[in-house]
């Protein structure tokens, strides 16, 4: 008689094992690389881009300048330059010469043809629809329900009505990642065909992919290999992983690359879905979690570090919030749904997004790649950056130190720009670290493009796709003032910056000097006023009362409370 089978005591295998290799989309091209210019969006990208590739492939350097882009795409020189500069800001390879090119050298350096092809291909991408907030009551509590524009709503276009009546919230990072990866999955065959080269096999042409061509996929995707991030593409793929570095790798048939990538993308998407379901069914955590806005404070708001995902600061309401370089473990920041607050991010960054904020002041230290400000109302934004994109904002003022022309798109109203107006002790050190030049400031050279963003997933009224966005106006120099950043951590900062590193235009410098002279004169008059001691006390008391009233009326009283609390 056979021995009875003992029940197994070993633990059940993991029902949802993590795939050995996980593909992630690179977020930067999708977050910062989409340009709302109709001529860049093709109904059939392969049909449109193949002749362009063939025409430019004869170049010995395989690099393309803005003049060639303007001619081939039939766009203006300003828009062609915008294409090259935007591509440079989202490139995957830091050693590409375009990344480090000085503004005057951008055209002579040009863009790699394969990167340009991929950049133009993803211009047909449609962003994921914004989601609703988990707590609409909390949103209503902090997002003002009235605006100076409410009286105009009856005269607005349907596009503006849609935007003005919606309270938009960004999709979760997991949802966005899955949406972007699904786009790449759908278009993978086309993308590989544009990167391939024909070779003759047994008398017939067959498309193959070289290891160099495969590496250019790094513009769109990146691999995690068993949890280790940042694996080079050629090392993650089985067909190039063991290539002799001293010998040219043998090209691989496109069909082989296509099948392997499709399989890996499918398993990655399945992993993302299971991860999202686990978050929905279990305790919420991580960057997909919303902070209840009414409860948010400088210490409770989300600042979530991750190697690949951005640091997310969400839900700060009626308070001040400070982050220094030592507090941020990654190179990208998203400030989302912050209201009636002052936010300081005093750190060197690569990318930054400000989304859905209102009645706030937001200071970004030094951003070396790109900043995007979207769906904000009555916000003052102070930025030192390589480039900035402003989309769908109202009644905002931007104090800019930027090396490239500010890009303005979408449904904007009453936007003002002014030169940069602040500093902190490590600002110049951070600017040098990320490659911002203080001698170039194009703050007042806004480049307005489409009033309708063809990359969103909303339906738009017919006939508005070619309309140009409302541009910016200059802030009146008489209204320009310096913004003083409090010395939050006295003695901890070792930087050398003692003043605004961006030179002020004459009109603003003259106004600033006039204001300083007026203040000095008033102080002198008060000191020399022939008043008895009791009258001086009355005057001092009256000044304190007016100052206190101004603090409460302007909301700046919160900053004093925050300073006392720290």
Image (tube, rainbow, N blue to C red):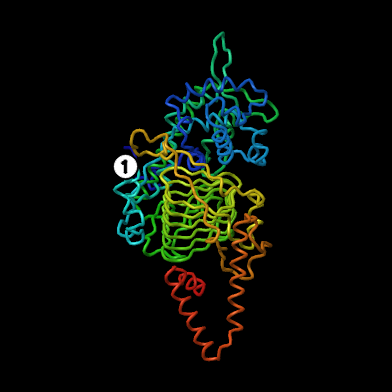
Where is residue 190? Give x, y as percent: 47, 25
Q: Residues within 10 Å of mark 1 (few under 14, many from 20)?
A: few
Where is residue 555? Give x, y as percent: 44, 68
Residue at 36% of width from left, 42% of height from top? 129
Q: In the picture shown, does residue 519 fall above or below 4? A: below
Residue at 58% of width from left, 12% of height from top? 200
Rendered-image quadrant of the N terminus: top left
Q: Secondary structure at mark 1?
A: helix
The count of marks equals 1
Q: Is residue 120 left or right of residue 95?
A: left
Residue at 31% of width from left, 46% of height from top? 155
Which residue carries the number 1 mark? Answer: 158
Q: Nearer the viewer, residue 359 or 22?
A: 359
Residue at 46% of width from left, 65% of height from top? 299
Q: Is residue 301 left or right of residue 101?
A: left
Q: In the picture shown, does residue 33 fall above or below 398? A: above
Residue ranking furthest to the top: 203
Q: Nearer the viewer, residue 37 or 232?
A: 37
């Amino acid at each position: 008689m056979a021995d009875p089978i003992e029940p197994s005591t070993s633990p059940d295998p993991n029902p949802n094992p993590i795939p050995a290799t996980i593909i992630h989309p690179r977020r930067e091209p999708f977050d910062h690389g989409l340009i709302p210019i109709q001529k860049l969006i093709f109904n059939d990208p392969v049909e449109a881009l193949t002749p362009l590739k063939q025409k430019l492939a004869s170049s010995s350097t395989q690099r393309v300048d803005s003049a060639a882009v303007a001619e081939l795409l039939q766009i203006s020189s300003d828009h062609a330059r915008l294409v090259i500069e935007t591509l440079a800001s989202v490139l995957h390879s830091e050693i590409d010469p375009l990344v480090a090119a000085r503004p005057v050298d951008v055209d002579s350096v040009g863009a790699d043809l394969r990167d340009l092809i991929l950049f133009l291909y993803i211009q047909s991408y449609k962003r994921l629809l914004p989601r609703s907030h988990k707590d609409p009551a909390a949103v209503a509590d902090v997002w003002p329900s009235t605006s100076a524009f409410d009286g105009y709503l009856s005269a607005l276009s349907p596009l503006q009505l849609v935007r003005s009546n919606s309270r938009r919230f960004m999709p979760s990072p997991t949802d966005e990642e899955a949406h972007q990866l699904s786009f790449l999955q759908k278009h993978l065959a086309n993308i590989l065909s544009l990167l391939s080269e024909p070779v003759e096999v047994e008398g017939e042409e067959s498309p193959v992919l070289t290891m160099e061509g495969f590496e250019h996929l790094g513009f769109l995707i990146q691999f995690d290999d068993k949890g280790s991030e940042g694996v080079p593409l050629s090392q993650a793929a089985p067909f190039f992983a063991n290539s002799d570095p001293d010998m040219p790798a043998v090209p691989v048939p496109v069909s082989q690359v296509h099948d392997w990538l499709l399989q890996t993308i499918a398993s990655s998407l399945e992993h993302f879905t299971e991860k999202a379901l686990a978050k929905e069914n279990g305790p919420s955590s991580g960057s997909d979690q919303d902070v209840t806005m009414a409860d948010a404070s400088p210490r409770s708001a989300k600042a979530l570090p991750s190697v690949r995902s951005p640091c997310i600061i969400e839900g700060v309401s009626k308070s001040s919030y400070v982050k220094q370089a030592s507090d941020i473990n990654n190179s990208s920041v998203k400030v989302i749904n912050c209201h009636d607050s002052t936010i300081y991010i005093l750190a060197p960054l690569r990318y930054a997004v400000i989304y859905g904020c209102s009645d706030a002041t937001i200071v970004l230290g030094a951003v070396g790649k790109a900043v995007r400000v979207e769906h904000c109302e009555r916000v003052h934004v102070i930025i030192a950056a390589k480039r900035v994109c402003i989309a769908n904002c109202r009644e905002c003022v931007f104090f800019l130190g930027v090396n490239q022309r500010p890009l303005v798109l979408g449904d904007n109203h009453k936007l003002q720009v002014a030169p940069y107006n602040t500093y902190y002790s490590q600002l110049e050190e951070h600017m040098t670290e990320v490659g911002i030049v203080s001698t170039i400031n194009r703050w007042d050279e806004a480049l307005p493009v489409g009033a309708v963003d063809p990359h969103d997933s909303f339906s738009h009224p017919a006939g508005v796709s070619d309309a140009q966005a409302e541009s910016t106006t200059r802030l009146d120099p008489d209204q320009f003032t310096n913004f003083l950043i409090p010395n939050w951590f006295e003695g901890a900062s070792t930087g050398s910056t003692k003043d605004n590193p961006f030179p002020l235009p004459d009109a603003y410098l003259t106004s600033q000097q006039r204001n300083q002279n007026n203040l000095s004169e008033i102080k002198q008059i008060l000191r020399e006023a022939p008043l008895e001691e009791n009258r001086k006390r009355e005057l001092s008391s009256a000044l304190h009362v007016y100052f206190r009233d101004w603090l409460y009326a302007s909301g700046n009283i919160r900053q004093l409370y925050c300073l006392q609390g720290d």
